[in-house]
Amino acid sequence: MRIGVVTDIHDAAEELARALAVLRTERVDAVVCLGDATDQFGPRNRAAEVATLFRDAGAKLVWGNHDHGLCHDSDPVVKARYDADTLATFASASPRIELAGCHFSHVEPWIDAHDPAALWHFGGLPRTDEMLGKTFASFPHRAAFVGHHHCWFATTPTGRVSWDGSAPLRLAAEDRYLIVVAPIFQRSFAVVDTDRGVVIPHTLPDC
């Protein structure tokens, strides 16, 4: 299966539209957004545009720290700011998605995505033996994909993989991975080919 993975849009609707156009040409089987599709706390409010793009792409969404209040247990005051179609799109978001043997969430799988405070976890990427153990014990899948950290990063249970998103990452059949996908607002996204065991990073060119 070929899965297009986008994350941390933060209302960058133009970059999202360009990325989704690339994913259409790549003929992916599904599109997954790893959260922070919109930014309830930012100066822009382009949630309606972002929601329309995701609806047209048939995307699956998980929520992040910047859009949790719109996706889950929305306050009536928050809901009043958005139209019905936008609300329905964000209401379809989940705390996590399991697809083709992979786990998709905004933050590391051990973090409770129903806890707004926990979603703001900025304890750093898992690098120590303790954090690696905690992280990989929290999901059984071959690979877990997260956003939130605004960078490319990959690790196995034994330590970080030498990979910076400048080339495809081939997943060893005998290993397990946590992979951080860089954000759309930095013009980055990925295609995950689960049959071939490869993560193909993309960076949009400057306009």
Image: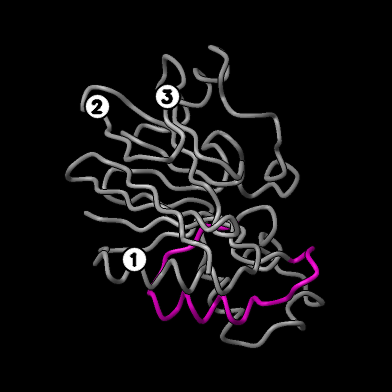
Amino acid type at circle 1 is Leu
Number of the label disc, if any, that sits on residue 23: 1
Query: Could you say where residue 159 lies in the image, as x and y percent from the top left?
Result: 45, 17
| Badge 1 element | helix
Image vertical order of residue 35 relative to residue 145, above or below:
below
Amino acid type at circle 2 is Ala
Badge 2 local density, few (<14 within 10 Å), some, or many (20+)?
Answer: few
* Residue farthest along the left direction in this orientation: 195
Query: Could you say where residue 25 lies in the image, as x and y percent from the top left?
Result: 27, 70
Spatial distance from mark 1 to mark 3, Cα to Cα? 26 Å
Q: Earlier in the sequence, mark 2 or mark 1?
A: 1
Query: Could you say where residue 116 lies in the image, as x and y percent from the top left?
Result: 72, 50
Image vertical order of residue 2 relative to residue 86, above or below:
above
Q: Is residue 42 magenta?
A: yes
Number of the label disc, if any, that sits on residue 180: none
Q: Which residues are the magenta region?
A: 40-63
Spatial distance from mark 2 to mark 1, Cα to Cα? 25 Å
Residue behind mark 2 = 172
Residue behind mark 3 = 162
Amino acid type at circle 3 is Ser
| Left or right side of 179 for 80 | right
Which residue shows up at 46% across the image and 34% down it? 164
Which residue shows up at 55% across the image and 37% down it? 108
Which residue shows up at 55% across the image and 48% down it? 106
Badge 3 local density, few (<14 within 10 Å), some, or many (20+)?
Answer: few
| Left or right side of 91 for 174 | left
